């Protein structure tokens, strides 16, 4: 029989907007918005409900301390970035990081890409001023253009349709790479070519790859060749920011008659949109995907417990992930009470560390950047707090790229602020480059061995 409980239905868009939806663009043409939404509703799902359920089971293992979550990808995807090379490079660094974490820490790693939908970003201001000219802020390719012109910065709902097509293309490439041989463990050396091979962290990775090669040769010699050696299950995720997009991509599953947001396997609510009575919490409380919430330094334990009650009223393991983003200087002071009280309330949740968003600053050159040491310090604080409380540090959420960019300072390459201009390519926040990402994976593996 169809499930007709109130939680099996979703409010319409007008109801959501009436709740005071934060961080939404001011579209000048409502008819164009309606047309874009109608088109999106007619498109096939990008992911399937059964895939979301499998990810939820894996995240339940994370919440029990039986697995570790690696979530990573672009700060903000761009339409121009949907190329085979770009997708392969991001996938490659995630595969390398997962191999390091799995082999060095002996823990299963759940792989969650921050891709195929991460086209919109919240902004601290609706407007941007340059040289006396004020225009709407760039909110990601899902909303408007990056070029600082009046025409480019007008919010265009047709871009939501482009998000769908760009996400579909990205997912097709990811599935081809992960099932077509590229993710085969016998490729561990091939993933370590070009500039990384000559770096200290690349040589360290090569040593791990050689050990894996020997293990695979032994397994082959005794006739063991499991399917897991040849392919990887990589899930997709993005911030559920644009209500028109997420609402139109929410469909009723034919198996269960329950709603799923089929734009991604995992969607999260950001720090700026986690109002308990807000539209984003309301919408995500209705879908059956595994979901996350970013918790910044203003989050109280009561806030977190109330969010859990709204978003996971059945206290289902794997349903809810809390992604903390406190900042390196605050995590040791703020996280203990949060974790302790949430755990004491019996809340089933996976704890994940976002060490990026609390550590952004503006360099003297004007570039937004992050210091690698601050990123590592926040992850270390996250592990220290959980170790002290006897709880499980369930994962990391990283903004990264598979390219040799110069956006974050520090790390083994000793990038300095003067280097930022050499290859700063992000249209929003600074990302770890491939070498820094691998270095982080080794450091996190060491922390995991002690957890």
Image: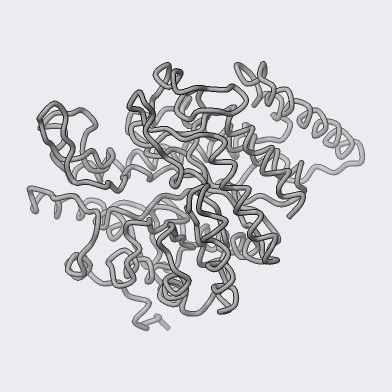
What coloring was used for the rendering? one colour
Which of these two is toward me, 416 or 438? 416
Q: How far from the left and from the top, in percent, is residue 427?
A: 33, 32
Side of 352 relative to 447 (left or right): left
Q: How far from the left and from the top, in percent, is residue 12?
A: 22, 69
Q: In which quadrant of the rendered image does the C terminus lie?
A: bottom right
The image shows residue 203, relative to residue 246, as above or below, that is: above
Which of these two is toward me, 328 or 13? 328
Q: In which quadrant of the rendered image does the N terminus lie?
A: bottom left
Tell me the quarter of the picture where residue 438 sits: top right
Side of 224 relative to 69 (left or right): right
Side of 86 relative to 250 (left or right): right
Residue 193 visible at all = yes
Q: How far from the left and from the top, in percent, is residue 431?
A: 46, 34
Tell me the quarter of the picture where residue 76 sits: top left
Residue at 70%, 52% in the rendered image: 108
Residue 255 visible at all = no
Q: How far from the left and from the top, in percent, is residue 13?
A: 21, 65
The image shows residue 238, relative to residue 335, as above or below, that is: above
Residue at 71%, 43% in the rendered image: 445
Residue at 68%, 26% in the rendered image: 201
The image shows residue 56, relative to residue 160, as above or below, that is: below
Side of 233 relative to 75 (left or right): right
Q: How many marks?
A: 0
Tell me the quarter of the picture where residue 339 sits: bottom right
Residue at 65%, 54% in the rendered image: 383
């Amino acid at each position: 029989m169809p499930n007709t409980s109130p939680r099996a239905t979703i409010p319409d868009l007008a109801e959501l907007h009436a709740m005071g939806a934060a961080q939404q663009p001011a579209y000048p043409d409502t008819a164009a918005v309606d047309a874009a939404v109608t088109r999106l509703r007619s498109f096939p799902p990008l992911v399937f409900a059964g895939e979301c359920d499998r990810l939820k089971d894996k995240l339940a293992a994370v919440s029990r301390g039986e697995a570790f979550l690696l979530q990573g990808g672009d700060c903000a995807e761009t339409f121009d970035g949907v190329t085979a090379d770009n997708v392969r490079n991001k996938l490659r660094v995630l595969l390398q990081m997962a191999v390091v974490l799995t082999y060095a820490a002996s823990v299963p790693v759940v792989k969650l890409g921050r891709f195929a939908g991460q086209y919109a970003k919240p902004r601290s201001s609706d407007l941007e001023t340059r040289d006396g000219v004020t225009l709407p802020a760039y909110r990601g390719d899902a909303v408007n253009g990056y070029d600082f012109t009046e025409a480019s910065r007008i919010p265009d709902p047709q871009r939501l349709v482009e998000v769908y097509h760009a996400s579909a293309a990205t997912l097709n490439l990811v599935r081809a790479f992960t099932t077509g041989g590229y993710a085969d463990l016998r490729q561990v050396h091939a993933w370590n070519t070009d500039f990384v091979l000559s770096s200290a962290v690349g040589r360290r990775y090569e040593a791990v790859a050689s050990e894996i090669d020997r293990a695979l040769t032994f397994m082959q010699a005794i006739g063991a060749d499991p399917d897991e050696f040849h392919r990887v299950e990589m899930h997709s995720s993005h911030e559920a920011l644009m209500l028109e997009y997420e609402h139109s991509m929410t469909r009723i599953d034919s198996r269960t008659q329950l709603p799923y947001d089929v734009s991604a396997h995992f969607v999260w609510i950001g720090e700026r949109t986690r109002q308990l009575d807000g539209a984003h919490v309301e919408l995500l409380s209705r879908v059956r995907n595994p979901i996350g919430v970013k918790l910044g330094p203003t989050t109280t334990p009561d806030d977190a417990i109330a969010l859990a009650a709204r978003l996971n009223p059945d206290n289902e393991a794997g349903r809810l992930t809390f992604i903390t983003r406190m900042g390196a200087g605050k995590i040791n002071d703020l996280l203990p009470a949060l974790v302790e009280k949430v755990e004491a309330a019996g809340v089933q949740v996976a704890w994940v560390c976002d060490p990026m968003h609390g550590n952004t600053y503006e360099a003297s050159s004007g570039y937004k950047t992050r210091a690698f040491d601050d990123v590592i310090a926040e992850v270390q604080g996250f592990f220290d707090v959980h170790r002290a409380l006897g709880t499980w540090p369930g994962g990391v959420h990283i903004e990264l790229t598979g390219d040799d960019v110069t956006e974050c300072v520090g790390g083994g390459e000793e990038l300095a602020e003067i280097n930022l201009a050499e290859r700063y390519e992000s249209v929003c926040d600074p990302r770890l480059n491939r070498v820094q990402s691998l270095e982080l994976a080794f450091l996190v593996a060491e922390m995991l061995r002690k957890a």
